[in-house]
Image (cartoon, grey):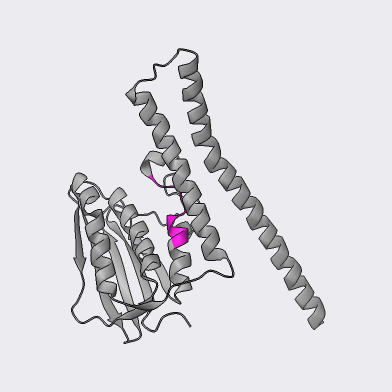
Amino acid sequence: GNLGHTFNSMAEGLENAEKQRRVLVADIAHELRTPLTNVQGYIEAVRDGVLEPDNATIETIHQQVLYLARLMDDLRLLAETEADDFYLNIEENSMTEVVEMSVEAFRPSADLKNVAITAVMPPGLPLINMDRTRIAQVLNNLLSNAIRHTPGGGEVTVSGETVKQSSIRITVSDSGEGISSEDLPFVFNRFHRADPSRTRSTGGVGLGLTIAKQLVEAHGGTISVTSVTGQGTDFVIDVPIDGPS
């Protein structure tokens, strides 16, 4: 009976893995098809004399190529985080420094949208065992999303606190458009966009939050999200001070 139960569980696991593989391949094909079709269409139009090879045309093609480059980079990083030999360079670091540097890096893009961006980190936060570069990647993904979905005059705030002297909690809050209750359960899924039209001008490649979740969990931490449509979104990261086990 135990053997039969174990065998059925194994078969179910293999079936689910195969389904996920097929879905991933289909998603990647979908993501690649649109920008490649756009690039092909513009190049053929220029070749046939329908469009002039002016700055506007070249810029449109350039944006599609940049999207493809971001997609390839994110897919590579996602593959790294899911590999059995994924490596974290764990060292004692200051979370306050990482947060403040990330905020300053995004200040120019926030200023362009007239969005106020602030780091509110309490004094005396303990040093934490973490991979500084990977945690910075998590913050960069969250800040990029927050600024993108916050209208002019809004604000983005990154705050920190110690939780039970065992972990540091970082909250990235924005006063943007929020996420609907229907989309909330899926925000960490690959290629998920709250924008039903999947418009690339209003979002990234749909892997940033998936990567952020993988990196936080690799540190032994957790990431969660709460949101109210029309009022804003809070992403909460808890990372253990002692680092991953």
Query: Is the residue 12 above or below the residue 22 in the image?
Result: below
**Magenta highlight on residue 204:** yes
Q: Residue at x 44, y 42 (%)?
A: 67
Report the residue that reaches farthest toward the top: 49
Residue 219 or 180: which is nearer the viewer?
219
Query: Is the residue 27 above or below the residue 3 in the image?
Result: above
Q: Which residue is drawn at 32% across and 53% down?
A: 144
Q: How many labels does the image show?
A: 0
Quarter occupied by residue 83: bottom right
User: Left of 236 or right of it: where is 122?
Assistant: left
Quarter occupied by residue 232: bottom left
User: Left of 183 or right of it: where is 113?
Assistant: left
**Magenta highlight on residue 205:** yes
* Residue 115 coordinates in the image, percent (x, y): 20, 51
* Residue 5 coordinates in the image, percent (x, y): 77, 77
Query: Is the residue 110 above or below the residue 57 in the image?
Result: below
Location of the N terminus by quadrant is: bottom right
Q: Is residue 17 shown to the viewer in this render?
A: yes
Report the residue that reaches farthest toward the bottom: 165
* Residue 108 coordinates in the image, percent (x, y): 21, 50
Q: Which residue is drawn at 46% across and 77% down?
A: 220
Q: Which residue is drawn at 46% across and 60% down?
A: 211
* Residue 175 coordinates in the image, percent (x, y): 24, 56
Q: Which residues lie in the magenta part?
A: 203-211
Q: Is residue 198 shown to the viewer in this render?
A: no
